[in-house]
Image (cartoon, rainbow, N blue to C red):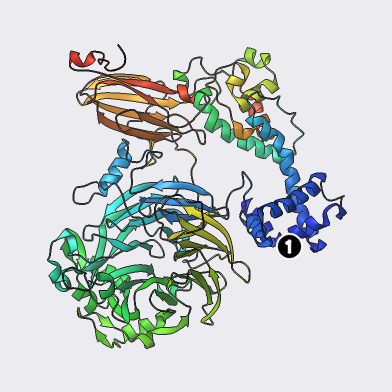
Amino acid sequence: MFQCKGRAVLIPFFAGLWLAFGCSESEQRAESSAPAPTPPVAAVPAADAATAQAEAEKIFSERCVTCHGANGAGDGPASAGLVPKPRNFQDTAWQQSVSDEYIEQIVQYGGAAVNKSPAMPANPDLMSKPAVVAALRVKIRSLAK
Amino acid sequence: MSKRHSNRLRGGVSALALAGALACGPGGDQALQPAAATGTSASVAALMKERGLSEADVNAALKTYMPTGKKDDYYIFSSGGQSGQVIVIGIPSMRILKYIAVFTPEPWQGWGFGDQGSQDVLAAGDRRGMVMRWGDTHHPNLSETNGDYDGQFLFIGDKANARMAVINLTDFATTQIVANPILESDHGAAFVTPNTEYVIEGSQYPTPLGGAYAPIEEYNEKYRGAITLWKFDRASGRIKPEESFAIEAPPYMQDLADAGKLDSDGWAFVNSFNTERAHGGNLEGQPPLESGASQNDMDYLHVVNWKKAEELFKAGKTVAINGFPVIPLETAAAEGILTFVPEPKSPHGADVTPDGKYVVVGGKLDTHATVYDFAKVKALIEAKDYVGKDPYGVPILDFQKSIKGQVELGLGPLHTVFDDKGNAYTSMFVESKIAKWSLSEMKLIEKLPVHYNIGHIAAAHGDTVKPQGHWVVAMNKWAIDRFADVGPLLPQNFQLVDVSGPSMQLVYDLPIPLGEPHYTQIVAADRIHAIDHYSPVGSNSLSHEKDPQSVDGGQERIERREDGVHVYMTQVRSHFTPDTIRVKQGETVHLHMTNLEQAKDATHGFGISSYNIALSLEPGEHDNVTFQADKAGVFPFYCLEFCSALHLEMAGYLIVEPTSPKLAETPKRTGGRS
């Protein structure tokens, strides 16, 4: 009934489908109430890493600075009304006390996910962007004094 | 990304190809196909069978389906009809992206529910001192540079109240409404000149200009139409009424308009109907308006030399009507600013071709699209080669000498748009079809049924100097049997048509469930540069500059002054600071509220019970509200957007202490069992 010549055209279509399945794990995780561990970050090509870092810088300035401040001292413009105060990333003792995975988990799932202040919001759009989450973690680490 | 996605679909995925793969199934090239795919192909075949889908259906679905996270290639900006709003829709998915509040208060956007900025915009569009609470948006027009959409501004007219609005396309928000000081209704509005020097607003129903009174018996002598040219200042993003003017027109009913471009730049073309000057009176021995208005075989296409009109305006050759400068009809006629060409009766669209050489007119009660040759029209005007004058002294050109020709299309040709291959697409209201025809060969190519009673039609950049083709949207006035029943008031039906192939293909039906839209424009997504937050924090959404009353974090306070209680409040996930406001009954309360967030989508709302206040504080936005706390009691306020896991907790109280101790008593409970 149908001609098999259409198959070649379809392969990219199904390849896209396959990629979508690849993404579904993180999407399912986003919908679940209990956060899952952060997936290990695969080695990222340099160009992609630069892109991720640029995106992380932009996100940091737009989302994080409001409470944590431009230098991460926990003194952003919205910090005045917050109890408890936003985390001071310059605090070396705190930096040493937490793992990379812990920071990445808070970035993605918010403070409530680790029994910290729920005023720290989740960033659900980053759950499918591990390279950007990693770059944000690097940014946070770089603020230690 | 989305372009590539779309191109891939365009490039080859057809229903036949899909079905071919389905038939190949496990026999296909296993090395290249993921295991999941073969199972999926079988399930797609099963789905097709189960849902009774044809190959054409699957093809249409593949052309329009947008996986989550993928963005559309085009924006549709649609009028929202009597909702007074503008609807933003994506192509090819036809997902509704936004309703932009324009002439009607709209609580989600905090438009007209306490926010001083939006209330000032609405108040500026008052009619005779009354703030209008609705509008009938008709024709959206995008700002243009060199005759193509530049994606910066959108203009839209309000037919019901003769008003014009400006929408800033960085934040998709209305920034200005101007009320026409001489007209009561408009229709050919808005149409921009090729570099958005002017936004044209043509009248619809003649009245004595400037809000005056005259008995209807003096219709011919005292009633008039007018073509208003609103000066637009791109730098400030505002219409400048003080640099705007109008051209008086006879009491015919002026209709759709289009500005000339390229060869016809400097000119505008406005349709009219009712050159019979009927004005109803069917209980007074007169014919009903609509039959009185359709006696003549021809009405008049108004050919307007707006560049010359601008010179006359600047030279002061105007009279002031209700304080607005108007070039009188006799001056317009004598100076060659206004010339008529006969056009088939009761026309609707006057559409300039992309090269600016021709104007296509669809006569609703005629079977043709009439193509006027601008070079011929201009030569006749320059030679003063007239066949006569109308009762007001406006010169009339010879119809046959003015046209390139007529194309027989069928019943009810209404409005025409263009693609990138030299084709024209005309909506056929009476036939419920789109007619595709060749502009160069003046020949009908194909007709496609649409459902039903198509009014306007739009194509991607289809009324610019560079149409992009591919997509056409039919704006059908009636839906009848297309959607699940929702009572006697039915939605309209927008149908997306793929015109990229040799034959037109209907690929999607979108019900429009709020107001009856009229015209739309379709612009490539890459022309739109929208912001996702206001910066700096504390920006006024009208000026996009820091509001003088904006509140920095840590500076929240309540101050009592002579003019009332000033509350300087901030919002951040998930609290208001302050969250307790204590005032005395009768005090004037001024809320100055800044959303400190800069994160995309971190909008906070502010709603307060019993005081009719609803605000939308988008990231970085500042709003001011002033109200009288005239009702004693306790009034919760809360965030209207589900901003975080603690959204429900983002709340506070306005506590209004009664002036009379009696009011402070607990209300007596009545009824119930004793």
Depth order, front residue of B282/B224:
B282
Is residue B295 shown above or below B243? below
B194 relative to A132, above or below = below
Please report the residue visible at 28 percent of the width from the left and 42 percent of the height from the top. B120
Q: Mark 1: which amino acid?
A: Leu
Horizontal relation, residue B380 to residue A18: left or right: left
Pinpoint the chain carrying mark 1.
B
Where residue B365 appears, x then y in whole percent? 38, 76
Q: Is residue B274 visible?
A: no
Question: For numbered disc 1, what is the local secondary structure?
Answer: helix
Image location (x, y in percent) of residue B438: 54, 78
Q: Quadrant of residue B79?
A: bottom left
Viewer-proximal residue among B231 and B269: B269
Q: In this orientation, does residue B231 appear?
A: yes
Q: Which residue is mark 1?
A: B16
Q: Is residue B560 above or below residue B408?
A: above
Q: Residues within 10 Å of mark 1 (few under 14, many from 20)?
A: many
